[in-house]
Image: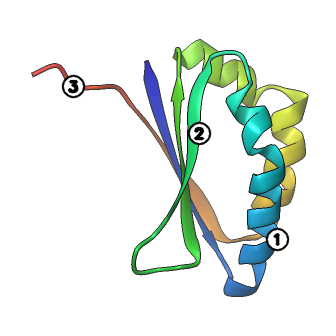
Amino acid sequence: MLIRLVRMTFTEENVPAFLEIFKASRDKIAAFPGCRSVELLQDYHLPHVYSTYSHWDSDEALNHYRKSEFFGSVWKPTKALFSEPAQAFSFKLAMV
């Protein structure tokens, strides 16, 4: 399983527009083949900073989503709202 965290910083006035985009697309993202879950997190101290936290079956499943027409239709308008570039991280559970 792949855990994906994408940190996005918005200007305060763009937060409502981002939240509308996320609300409209969350269920479609979660229903995408290979996606197990998707959550939206808000930074505790910086209310204009959000992160998506998602679980994917594999790197291939995530890449299939990222190459989809649907992703482009969500990412392009979201990216236009950023006040700085997004940061994306991929994780797996550590076996200790």
Determine which residue is flagged by label 1.
17
Quarter of the figure with residue 17? bottom right
Front disc: 3 or 1? 1
Determine which residue is flagged by label 2.
38
**Numbered mark located on residue 79 in the image:** none
* Mark closest to the chain's N terminus, 2 or 3: 2
- Amino acid type at image mark 2: Val
Q: Quadrant of the C terminus?
A: top left
Quarter of the figure with residue 16? bottom right
Considering depth in this image, is 46 or 19 the residue closer to the camera? Answer: 19
Name the spot of residue 77 as percent of width and height, x first: 86, 58
Q: Secondary structure at mark 2?
A: strand
- Decide: is 41 above or below 56: below
Name the spot of residue 68 as percent of width and height, x first: 83, 26
Q: Are marks 3 and 1 in contact (CB under 8 Å)?
A: no
Quarter of the figure with residue 36? top right
- Amino acid type at image mark 1: Ala
- Residue in the image at 60% along x and 13% along y: 60
User: How far apart are labels 3 and 1 at the CA level?
Assistant: 36 Å
- Amino acid type at image mark 3: Ala
